[in-house]
Image (cartoon, rainbow, N blue to C red):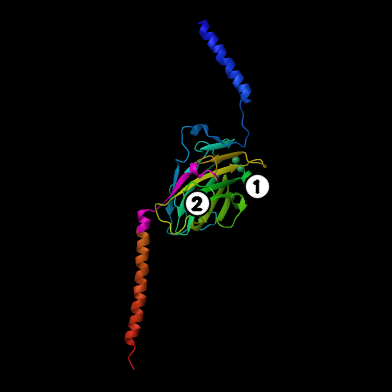
Amino acid sequence: MRRIVWILVIVGSLVAVGLRVLGASPNISFPAAVTLRNPSALFQAAGTKSLRSVRFMTPPVMDGSLNEWPSGEGVVLSRDTAYAFSGRVDSTADCSAVIRSGWTQTNLYFAIQVSDDVIVTDSSDVWRDDGVELGLDGARDLQPWGTDDHQYTIVADGRVTDRSVTTQDITAAVSARPGGYDIEVAIPMAKLAPGTVISGTVLGFTWAIHDDDDGGNWDAYLIWDGTNTSSMPDEFGSLALTERPEDRIAALEAKVTELEAKVQELLVILAEFEQVTPP
Ligand SMILES: [Ca+2]
Ligand SMILES: [Ca+2]
Ligand SMILES: [Ca+2]
Ligand SMILES: [Ca+2]
């Protein structure tokens, strides 16, 4: 028994010395800017989340109204679902969002419904205000600095940046509503993938929300997958371009109708030729 007590005393002393050497304190506190793994996601690996993007037959209108969007698959970002989480979030009404995605040959689209109790856009730095970040690794090569890589920020007041630099490469519309704001974004496919994209293409993707309720710096920052939206695409989740069978059939039917119209035109021209009597 006495031996066990001595061992406990020695181990306790060593831990105390170790903490002093490391400059640590038992009440460790982190500065607000450090992004931590969300405690509720501790057993979840980065890069495992996915969102399906549905092919659009008719592209949505970028006006901030999401009425024309199919109710389809959306994913929620909240303090419970975020991979990384900093600052304070009191409730889903304080800071959360739902994102949906669609695509055509020319554009990748997102519709984001943000719940936020107080909308603030008082800072010149876009990341200090209410807004959403979209992290994209178009080639999904896990390399962050290629022409396929972007960190688009859309602020609640409509400002748009790519890696904090103002850009007009993408089209975004924001509309405020009671309890939050809606965002619609169109990103040219040419900014993400060379050539023609097809159903089955998978892009590296994550997204984040900043919440500022009292001016100055942000109060909360939630990241869907990974620990940042710009430089670590190896931690991003994925965005899969999909096509519903009924849309594929509708596209084929539209093509057949188009061809039928062309055949009719040709028949009219042929009939005119037949009526021409040779000199
Ligand atoms: Ca719209
Ligand atoms: Ca808020
Ligand atoms: Ca890349
Ligand atoms: Ca806010």
**Residue furthest to the bottom:** 279
**Residue at left 58%, top 17%?**
14
Decide: few, some or many residues near mark 1? Use Cα within 10 Å; few <14, some 14-19, many ≥20: few
Q: Which residues are magenta?
A: 230-248
**Residue at left 34%, top 88%?**
276
Residue 187 screen position, x and y as percent: 52, 55
Relative to 1, say whether 259 is above or below: below
Residue that mark 2 sits on: 110
Query: Seen in the image, is 74 located left or right of residue 182?
Result: left
The front one of 45 and 69 is: 45
If the picture is divided into quarters, which one holds ligand 2? top right
Quadrant position of the C terminus in the picture? bottom left
CB at disc 2 and ligand 1 closer than 8 Å: no
Foreground mark, 1 or 2, reads 1
Residue that mark 1 sits on: 125
Res 192 label: none
Relative to 225, say whether 192 is above or below: below
Decide: few, some or many residues near mark 2? Use Cα within 10 Å; few <14, some 14-19, many ≥20: many
Does dot 1 land on a helix, a strand or a loop? loop
Relative to 217, say whether 173 is above or below: below
Q: Which callout, 1 or 2, points at the residue further toward the start of the chain?
A: 2
The front one of 247 and 45 is: 45
Marks 1/2 in contact by CB < 8 Å: the verdict is: no
Residue 261 screen position, x and y as percent: 36, 72
Residue 148 screen position, x and y as percent: 51, 53
Residue 11 screen position, x and y as percent: 55, 15
Q: Is residue 24 visible?
A: no
Question: Residue 241 lies in magenta, yes or no?
Answer: yes
Amino acid type, mark 1? Asp
Amino acid type, mark 2? Phe
